[in-house]
Image (spheres, rainbow, N blue to C red):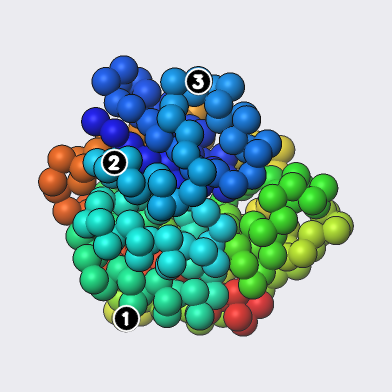
Amino acid sequence: MRIALAGLATSHPYTDARTLRADPATELVVWEPDPERLDRFRAEQPDAVVVPDLGALLATAPDGVVLTVPTSGVPEALARILDRKLPCFVNKPAAATGDQLGRLESVVTRAPELVLTSSVLRFAPAFAAFEVPREEVLAVRATVRHDVGLWATGYNPWQDEPTVGGGTLVMMGLHGVELLVALLGPAVRLVGAAATVRRHRGLRSEDTGLLAVQWDDGVPGTVEVLGVSQGEAYEVTVHTAAGERRVVLRGGADELGYRATVDAFLDMVRGAPSPVSWAQTRAVLEILTSARALA
């Protein structure tokens, strides 16, 4: 099996590559324009085949593609991948602004069954096993703790740029919104958003934010985005008349869902449709892009 890694713009494809190479029969082909990021990848994956551009990557006839480029470039790159009718996993986020989402949707609707884009947390084992009967739900809250202080040093500036990668509200907020939509469904809208800088001066975006949402049946929800944190953890709290039900996600790649996400993508390579509907993905991205515009 040959898997193409189109871009290494975040840390995620490095983790994906390690997971993919757990099967020694999997061949990796990679394209990344930044020489430092490519050198790091080569050091970790010396057997990977390196090609100079996306066209050359697709010319190797891969069985599937993991796409990780700056968010503003996702629609055009994805269009070229879908032209080859290849299953594609797009590392988050696939859109950060309304314009990006519009361009993305026009591409995805050609073949939504071939596109998976999601926070890996949706596939985390502890969350996959977490269930609360919908009729018992009074309100929900997701809390995202992931420090963004590195961006204040100038690292990966596109992620911190609101008009390109969406900044902390989108990049980190996606995890919380994804979990709540996975839990309660896509019939949800944004009702408010706020963002501020509390600690990490020098950011282009924010380090702390809040999103308020509401489902069509009236259930309210909040997503707390805490980009000032001593550790990485994600929590979903469901309020019921009997009290709180809670799941906390932390730990390594397996606990946070990286391996299960790659397994879901490999199922697509073998012919299964995307396990996450475009309706759910669009709901997540609509909330995030609306929050970005409002905040």
Secondary structure of residue under mark 3: loop
Q: Nearer the viewer, residue 130 or 280?
A: 280
- Write the residue at 27% across / 43% down: 61
Of circles 1 and 3, the one toward us is 3
Asked whether residue 228 is in view, the answer is no
Q: Earlier in the sequence, mark 3 or mark 2?
A: 3
Q: Residues within 10 Å of mark 1 (few under 14, many from 20)?
A: few
For residue 46, the mark is 3
Q: How many marks?
A: 3
Residue linked to disc 1? 216
Q: Earlier in the sequence, mark 1 or mark 2?
A: 2
Residue linked to disc 2? 62
- Write the residue at 40% across / 45% down: 57
Q: Amino acid at mark 3?
A: Pro
Q: Amino acid at mark 2?
A: Pro
> Measured along the vertical axis of the image, is residue 19 above or below residue 188?
above
Splitting the image into 4 quarters, where does residue 233 fall?
top right
Of circles 1 and 2, the one toward us is 2
Q: Is residue 282 left or right of residue 163?
A: left
